[in-house]
Amino acid sequence: MSEALPTRRLKIAVLSRSFSTQGGGAERYSVAVATQLAQTHEVHVFAQNFDTPPPGITVHKVGPALRRPRWLNQLIYAWQTARLTREGFDVVHSHENVWRADVQTFHVKSVRGSLLVGRTGWRRALAWLGVVTSPRKLTYLALETARCKPQAGRVQVAVSTLLAEELRAPYPNTPFEVITPGVDEPPTRMPRAQAQQQLGLAPDKTWLLLVGNDFKRKGLDAALAALAQLPSHVHLAVAGDTRQQANYLPIAQQLGVAPRLRFLGSLRDMSVAYQAAYLLVHPTLEDSFGMVVLEAMAHGLPVVVSGPAWCGVAAQLVHGQQAWLLQDPHNTQELADTIKKLLSNSELLEQLIHGLDGFLALNGWQQAAQRYERLYRQVAAHKMGTSPNNSFDTPPEAS
């Protein structure tokens, strides 16, 4: 072999149905990692929807995309990408529930775990009946089972330790690497008043920020209930997909906080929102990692976030030094008291801000991309029959 594998440029296929920074954490993760890798490798992305790609990335349109039913769209995408990436790539890296990829990155909780783990006897039989009579559940479970199957030359990656532990319950024979999201240094710095003006936020108010596309899962119910217990000068800005906005306006009106609530929609540049706020509130009920927490921290924005049982990134944070961790995101009194405490104590806020530097230095996208590059080279070496890692050639037995 004339070309040294550790140094040669790899040709990489990335599978991400929505390759956009305006999507959720999984989408932004795939864009960020691909952008880093494109600096030294040839990266091709196979997507149904995408923004203008970053320099060095070639995007291939996969379609057409079906809005409904989603399970059928997922199955079609899996079949199309399996066909399109069958040959010509050193590594195929998927962020999607598809059966064919060398590196499979998991961003959400397991389908099998949610449907079947912990159920025994007649409860398990009923759960299986629900699966086999539902094309949606059956498709998602079949795809997940295929991508979790241990096999030589394949690597499964979870985006947090919390998610890896959850995945190991239904798939105990599959080893899961953990590569957490990274964060970039903000491209621009601006005064808070300027950022508020750019977003049309009243400059004489104290703005909290909540970010997420699934408002319920990200804890907007708790945030609104806490807002009702806070002084009238404290307002809440919500960034994310506004399709659920109509469900929350009546709740805000009933709580008497509708005039203090502002929906910003999906922002192309989240940096402005982070710089406009005094505090990020993230009482999430379920987050495999919680990229918005890292992003807020990179902007010097203090963070209130659910503890490790609900949010993956919380396991890496020191309570009271790098963030304020909630014992129970359902407890609106705890959330309100925490916000009051932080907003009234400038020294505590400064303490949280100063505690971020060392943590952020170890959690850049460059570090995440370097870890993927090592995995890619192992995969490529295995394909060429030169794998230095014996464990790649002898995977555990499938269950």
Image (cartoon, rainbow, N blue to C red):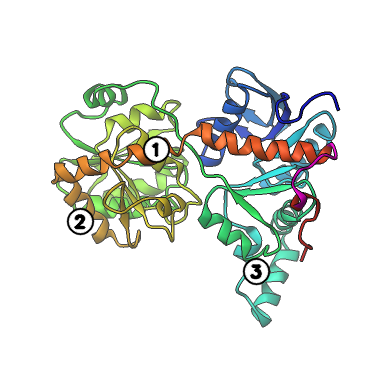
Q: Which residue is mark 2?
A: 337
Residue 51, position as x, y percentages in the image = 58, 24
> Please, which residue is most extreme toward the bottom here?
121
The circle on residue 116 is 3
Type of the residue with mark 1: Leu
**Badge 1 or badge 3: first in the primary sequence:** 3
Secondary structure of the residue carrying tag 2 is helix
Q: Nearer the viewer, residue 331 or 320?
A: 320
**Badge 3 or badge 2: first in the primary sequence:** 3
Residue 358 left/right relative to 287: left
Query: Looking at the image, do the residues carrying marks 1 and 3 touch, with CB atoms under 8 Å apart?
Result: no
Secondary structure of the residue carrying tag 3 is loop
Q: Which residues are drawn in magenta?
A: 384-390
Residue 238 left/right relative to 22: left
**Badge 1 or badge 2: first in the primary sequence:** 2
Q: Nearer the viewer, residue 377 or 97?
A: 377
Query: How many neighbours does mark 1 have within 10 angstroms: few (below 14), some (14-19), or many (20 or more)?
Result: some
Q: Which residue appears at 42% of the width and 47% of the height?
A: 215
Snapshot quadrant of residue 199: top left
Snapshot quadrant of residue 374: top right
Tell me the CA gap for discs 1 and 3: 37 Å
Residue 271, position as x, y percentages in the image = 37, 28
